[in-house]
Amino acid sequence: FGIPDIYMLDIQSKKITKVIATDAEEGSPAFSPDGKNVIFSSGGNITIINADGTDSKTLTNTSNDYDPRFSHDGKQILFSSFRSGNPELWIMDADGNNPKNLTNLDFAMSSEFSPDGKKIVFVIGRKIPDSIYTSMEIAVINSDGSGMQILTDQTTQSGSPAFSSDGKKIVFQSLLEGGIAIGQGKMTIRMIS
């Protein structure tokens, strides 16, 4: 299959341009709010590059960082990291300075800021009592890491949460309808308001 690189697609012309290609695996690209930069993970490090493919800069150097997302004002970057051995949520300034661990859980990934930047929605993994399985639930925390609330129950497999543009709803995918223990069920898009 090869090693994935970062590409940009012009919707109107359908022209595809390679933004960056290295010997490392690149993934999880996201535009900065002003559209001038692209942030992505590269070999487990967070990298930023101009949208035209020039001037790339590695912001972290741990080989454990993934899934970066800009805050809506472009001042901070939210990302997942395995620095502690488990996937946890971290935040840092947009220039890579001041990294801070936001969670201390067994599993926290797939995060996104609320439109006002005050909350973060993410997926938390929790062991299901009396079972060998782990549930994946939707949770929110304040952007400083405080005030965690788990929004779905402990019997589902949920993921890919995203806030509505007004921040009043969260849409996510889930196996809310049956079969977690035997790996069956229907993946459904749900909304929390």
Image (cartoon, rainbow, N blue to C red):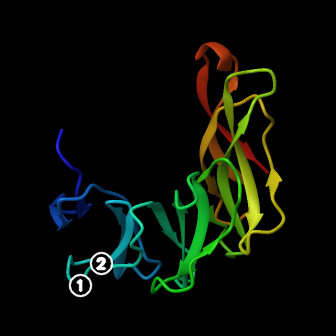
Query: Which residue is tagged 2?
Result: 49
How packed mark 1 is, by other alpha carbons closer than 10 Å (few <14, some 14-19, many 20 or more), is few
Query: Which residue is tagged 1?
Result: 55
Kindly report the distance in space between the C-alpha atoms of the residues bearing marks 2 and 1: 6 Å
In terms of depth relative to the viewer, which is nearer, 17 or 181?
181
Disc 2 marks which amino acid? Answer: Ile
Residue 85, given in percent of the width and then of the height, sits at 56, 53
Residue shown at the point (65%, 32%) measured from the top left: 157
**In the displayed image of the protein, which residue is found farthest to the front?**
85
Residue 128, given in percent of the width and then of the height, sits at 76, 29
* Marks 2,1: beta carbons within 8 A: yes
Element carrying mark 2: strand
Q: Can residue 168 be seen by looking at this rendering?
A: no
Residue 123, given in percent of the width and then of the height, sits at 65, 48
Residue 56, picture quadrant: bottom left
In terms of depth relative to the viewer, which is nearer, 129 or 173?
129
Image vertical order of residue 47 relative to residue 164, above or below: below
Residue 35, picture quadrant: bottom left
Which quarter of the figure is the N terminus placed in?
Answer: top left
Residue shown at the point (69%, 33%) measured from the top left: 135
How packed mark 2 is, by other alpha carbons closer than 10 Å (few <14, some 14-19, many 20 or more), is some
Residue 179, given in percent of the width and then of the height, sits at 66, 16
Residue shown at the point (68%, 58%) measured from the top left: 121
Image vertical order of residue 123 relative to residue 101, above or below: above
Residue shown at the point (71%, 30%) measured from the top left: 156
In terms of depth relative to the viewer, which is nearer, 94 or 186?
94
Image vertical order of residue 136 relative to residue 52, above or below: above
Image vertical order of residue 101 relative to residue 154, above or below: below
Element carrying mark 1: loop
Disc 1 marks which amino acid? Answer: Asp
